[in-house]
């Protein structure tokens, strides 16, 4: 009764109504700010035409990037490719941390997982030598974005639509493609069905994942043009996510750093990575076997390769990146565990 009496006295005070009105206005303002923040994060609701095409495009991207192929390798018993989702393993990249260095406050080079690097930066320059897994990573990002199957640190990427732009396909063009021409220039057969302004809307809303593969495949005379094209894209669409790949010899580590790109370098595979890759490769191979006998045949091949890579120094020196590991897995199966003893023999 005392509380009820106190409330009655307070609400009857002449200043209560004015004060309550002020608080209601403030609460309404805070609610509006929260709603606008959610709207900014989610983006406007796509119309029916955009959603329908986005679904068709996602199916195409998932199919086009669902397999890793070994080109230029003649095999009898082994397939020249395997399902990416089964065979892919996460790799490590170089990174920097401020704490723990000899000089306080000075960044120290360290090693981090590629997913951590991608999750921390919206613009990443990924460097690595031939065969280190750059293009395979681009495929993996495109596949997961299309299927919306990112997890952990990359869960927010499931709202992104991937655009895979392989620069070697653009070297003959007089002008590098604007967003409206991304699909046509990339050879996507669906390009004529895209709603007008579709790519532009995705880029503006921050829902585009722009995957630019192979700066090193651009002739020297055209690299400045490529750099200007990328800078213009970022200026026009700063909310999109960008991943650019290159060999280290093509451009310096600071390339595009003024546009907010963080450089990371793919590191050589360690013994644990190699063992994991061998396991993933054989799991992928088993998924495509036509009989139980064929699947069972892979068990001794996998065990023999694990043992050989761990005990033979020549193979250990070869198995330092995904391409070489894939070649060894395929040849080990195709040649019934008769493996090459030198890099030259492997190439031959």
Image (cartoon, rainbow, N blue to C red):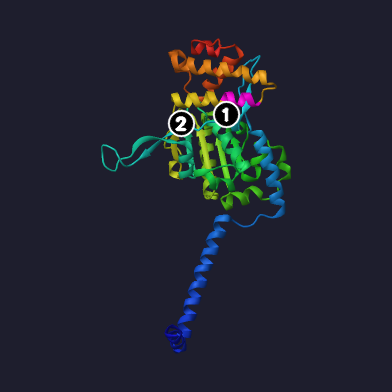
For label 2, count other residues whose C-alpha is less than 10 Å away and answer few (under 14), some (14-19) or many (20+): many
Q: Residue at x 72, y 40 (%)?
A: 190
- x, y percent for residue 195: 71, 49
Residue stretch in magenta? 281-287
The relative height of residue 302 versus residue 11 in the rendered view (above or below) is above
Which quarter of the figure is the C terminus placed in? Answer: top right
Residue lying at 68% horizontally and 42% vertically, measured from the top left? 57
Does the stretch in magenta take in 285? yes
The residue to which callout 1 is attached is 87
Image quadrant of residue 212?
top right
Would residue 88 be seen by someone viewing this image from the given angle? yes
Residue at far left of view = 103
The quarter of the picture where the N terminus appears is bottom left
Among numbered discs 2 and 1, the one appearing first in the sequence:
1
Q: Is residue 232 visible?
A: no
Label 2: element kind: loop
Find out whether residue 293 is within the magenta segment.
no
| The one of 114 and 236 positioned closer to us in this rendering | 114
User: Alpha carbon of mark 2 to alpha carbon of mark 1: how far?
Assistant: 18 Å
Between tags 2 and 1, which lies in front? 1
Badge 1 marks a residue whose secondary structure is helix
Please count the marks in the image.
2
Name the residue that disc number 2 marks: 266
Q: Residue at x 57, y 25 (%)?
A: 281
Q: What residue is rendered at 50% in x and 76% in y?
A: 24
x and y, in percent, of residue 42 in the image = 58, 55
| Front position in the image: 199 or 329 | 329
Q: Check the image and report above or below for 299 versus 53.
A: above
């Amino acid at each position: 009764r005392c509380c009820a009496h106190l409330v009655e006295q307070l609400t009857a005070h002449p200043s209560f109504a004015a004060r309550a009105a002020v608080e209601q206005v403030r609460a309404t303002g805070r609610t509006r700010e929260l709603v606008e923040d959610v709207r900014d994060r989610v983006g406007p609701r796509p119309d029916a035409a955009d959603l329908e095409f986005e679904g068709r495009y996602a199916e195409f991207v998932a199919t086009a990037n669902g397999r890793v192929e070994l080109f230029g390798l003649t095999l009898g018993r082994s397939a020249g490719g395997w399902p990416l989702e089964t065979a892919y393993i996460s790799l490590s990249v170089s990174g920097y941390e401020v704490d723990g260095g000899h000089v306080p406050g000075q960044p120290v080079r360290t090693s981090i997982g590629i997913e951590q690097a991608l999750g921390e930066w919206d613009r990443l320059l990924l460097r690595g030598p031939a065969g280190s897994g750059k293009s395979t990573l681009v495929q993996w990002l495109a596949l997961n974005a299309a299927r919306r199957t990112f997890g952990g640190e990359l869960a927010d990427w499931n709202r992104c639509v991937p655009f895979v732009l392989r620069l070697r396909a653009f070297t003959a063009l007089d002008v590098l493609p604007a967003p409206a021409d991304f699909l046509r220039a990339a050879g996507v057969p669906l390009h004529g069905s895209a709603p007008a302004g579709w790519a532009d809307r995705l880029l503006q809303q921050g829902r585009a994942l722009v995957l630019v593969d192979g700066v090193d495949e651009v002739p020297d005379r055209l690299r400045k043009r490529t750099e200007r094209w990328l800078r213009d894209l970022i200026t026009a669409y700063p909310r999109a996510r960008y991943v650019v790949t290159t060999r280290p010899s093509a451009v310096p580590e600071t390339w595009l750093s003024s546009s907010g790109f963080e450089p990371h370098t793919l590191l050589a595979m360690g013994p644990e990575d190699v063992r994991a890759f061998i396991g993933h490769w054989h799991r992928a191979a088993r998924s495509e076997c036509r009989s139980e006998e064929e699947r069972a045949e892979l068990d001794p091949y996998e065990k023999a390769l694990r043992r050989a890579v761990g005990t033979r120094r020549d193979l250990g020196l070869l198995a330092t990146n995904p391409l070489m590991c894939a070649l060894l897995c395929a040849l080990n199966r195709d040649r019934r565990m008769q493996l090459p003893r030198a890099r030259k023999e492997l190439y031959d």
